[in-house]
Image (cartoon, rainbow, N blue to C red):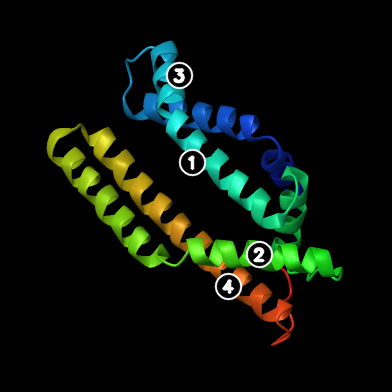
Amino acid sequence: MRGLRLLLARHLWLQLVLSVLVASALIMLLFPGRSVLSVLVRTAVMSVGAVAVVLNRRRKEKRAASGSTDDVVALDDKLRRSEVPSAPEERRAMGDLVAQRLHRMRHRVAALVGLAVLFTAVTVLMVLTGTVRQAIGFAVLTVVFIGWNIHRSNIQHRRLCAMEGALRGRSPAPAPR
């Protein structure tokens, strides 16, 4: 899994292709009868905004880490394994990256609540206006998507806080999960 995660972190285009394919498959499952090509094209076009957000985030993280994409990927891997860097330059880069990510996460609870409200509203509208398949599909998607986002958000926040504490010398970093 680590190798796949590192490959996807280094190659954003691969992430984009895989996400477009998965999203297209989900759309075709929930809304059968549409042509595969039209779904793929629409999904790819709608993904342009997400790509812009990811590229902007990557650019800011490279600036915070004072390095290249590989430096950010290496720091992120150390963060995931709770490995505190020993070199002073790398500790400073990790500290900057952790501070930036913690700052970006400051409104995570409100964002997750807003996302839950949005997905629940779409699910309710689908129950009222869609087919049974669409209603069930959106209900499952809502529960899985929101649950996964809450779970990953909590893990990431714990990792960042533990690394921040370890870099400041307050406590050792916890064992990796």
Q: Quadrant location of residue 138?
A: top left
- Disc with the residue nearer the chain's start (3 vs 1): 3
Q: CA distance from mark 1 to mark 4?
A: 24 Å
Q: Give the percent coordinates (x, y) of residue 162.
A: 64, 76
Type of amino acid at the residue the image marks with label 4: Arg
Mark 2 or 3: in front is 2
Mark 4 or 3: in front is 4
As drawn, 26 above or below 109: above
Confirm or deny contact between disc 4 and disc 3 (CB under 8 A): no
* Image point (42%, 25%), residue name: 43
Where is mark 2, residue-wise? 96
Mark 1 or 4: in front is 1
Type of amino acid at the residue the image marks with label 3: Leu
Where is mark 3, residue-wise? 40
Q: CA distance from mark 4 to mark 3?
A: 37 Å
Q: Nearer the viewer, residue 124 or 108?
A: 108
Where is mark 4, residue-wise? 158
Classify residue 56 as left or right of residue 111. right
Q: Give the percent coordinates (x, y) of residue 105.
A: 48, 63
The answer to whether any part of residue 177 appears in the image is: no
Where is mark 1, residue-wise? 53
Q: Nearer the viewer, residue 148 or 8?
A: 8
- Disc with the residue nearer the chain's start (1 vs 4): 1
Q: Residues within 10 Å of mark 2 (few under 14, many from 20)?
A: some
Residue located farthest toward the right when viewing the structure as drawn: 87
